[in-house]
Amino acid sequence: MVEDIINIVQDNIINNNLIKKDDKIVVAVSGGPDSMCLLDSLFKLKDKLKFKVVVAHVNHGIREESEQEKVYVEKFCKVRNIPFYYLKADVPALSKERKMSEEACGRSIRYDFFEEVRKKENADSIAVAHNLNDNVETILLNIVRGTGLKGLTGMDFKFNNIIRPLLTIEKKDILLYNKELELNPCFDKTNEEEIYLRNKIRLTLIPFLEKLNPNFITNISRMREILKEDNDFIDNYCNNILQKIIIKEDNSSIIFNFSLFMDEHNSIKKRIIRKIIERSISNLDGIESIHILDILNLLQNNIKGKMYIIGNKFKIEIIKKNNAVIYNEGGKHE
């Protein structure tokens, strides 16, 4: 199993252009079986593929075992001469201060730290240990919350600075990898508690669906590949239109000619509106279908001076017939 997984990781890296020669990779390591499989496999491949690794580990200040996990990961790195970065944060306190769930706050703190290490090390990417099971959970989570085509494709191998070399590997094979190499990873007991929606999907929904069809995980993976092809085609089509409609762009606004896409199918029009918003404010957090429909209605009415405002995120205004401008608050967020 060890050799099989290393070969799969290597294929994922090469086929998806995740790591190039002379790259430096920040590996996000919790000490659990997934991240230890990721770290160990990348360490074994680094000389062959000619890249470097550094490790970033975060203690969320939630569990008593966190200090032991830090010692475990740090020792693994020290023996192999891998640079090790560590952050201890009081997530429970910070989540209350920021008025966020502990889950969301912890994720924000983790990724901010990983990016901080990446910049400090002048590294190229951040490798995280999401596997095939994680991707299936994400797809089901999106379905439960309500999603479009993109949500049904789950996570990608690469998104901005994040890479996922384990994305096609099942959890059961990762556990075998750890066992065969006697890595003795740490186990987060909260993963076995139904305290988060994702945990409920992992612990209750997926086992139930696997009873209905033992090949459920594999079938969802196949579905994802089919839908991803379709989504990529539509996405590329919309990107080509987007390049044609932009008249002027700077750090705080984008002026665009919306008449160039108003004859398209509603599906394309909505997607282009989402892309314009994302291009302006760098994300779609808090942007719902009703907002997109309202903006589409604004553009279709095509009345000079009419505008649509979403809080402190952005506003769209018709500045003359067929031309609109989107203003973001405070410039683009990096």
Image (cartoon, rainbow, N blue to C red):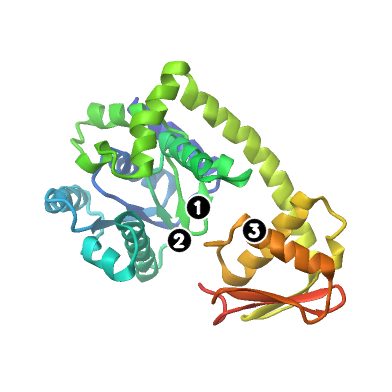
Q: Which residue is mark 3?
A: 290
Residue 65 appears at what percent x and percent y?
13, 48
Q: Which residue is mark 2?
A: 124
Report the residue at 39% width, 69% height from top: 119
Mark 3: secondary structure: helix
For the residue labelled by badge 2, is the local secondary structure a helix, a strand or a loop? Answer: loop
Q: Nearer the viewer, mark 2 or mark 1?
A: 2
Depth check, front residue: 316 or 136 = 316
The answer to whether residue 214 is visible is no
**Mark 2 or mark 1: which comes first in sequence?**
1
Amino acid under disc 1: Lys
Name the N-terminal-most of marks 1 and 3: 1
Amino acid of disc 3? Ile
Q: Compared with residue 306, is residue 194 higher up or lower down, i.e. above or below?
A: above
Residue underneath mark 1: 20
For marks 2 and 1, give the CA distance. Answer: 9 Å
- Find residue 87 and report its horizontal and vertical position in percent: 23, 63
Q: Residue at x 17, y 49 (%)?
A: 69
Q: Note whether residue 17 is visible.
A: yes
Residue 98 point in image, percent of width and height: 33, 69
The amino acid type, in three-letter code, at marker 2 is Asp
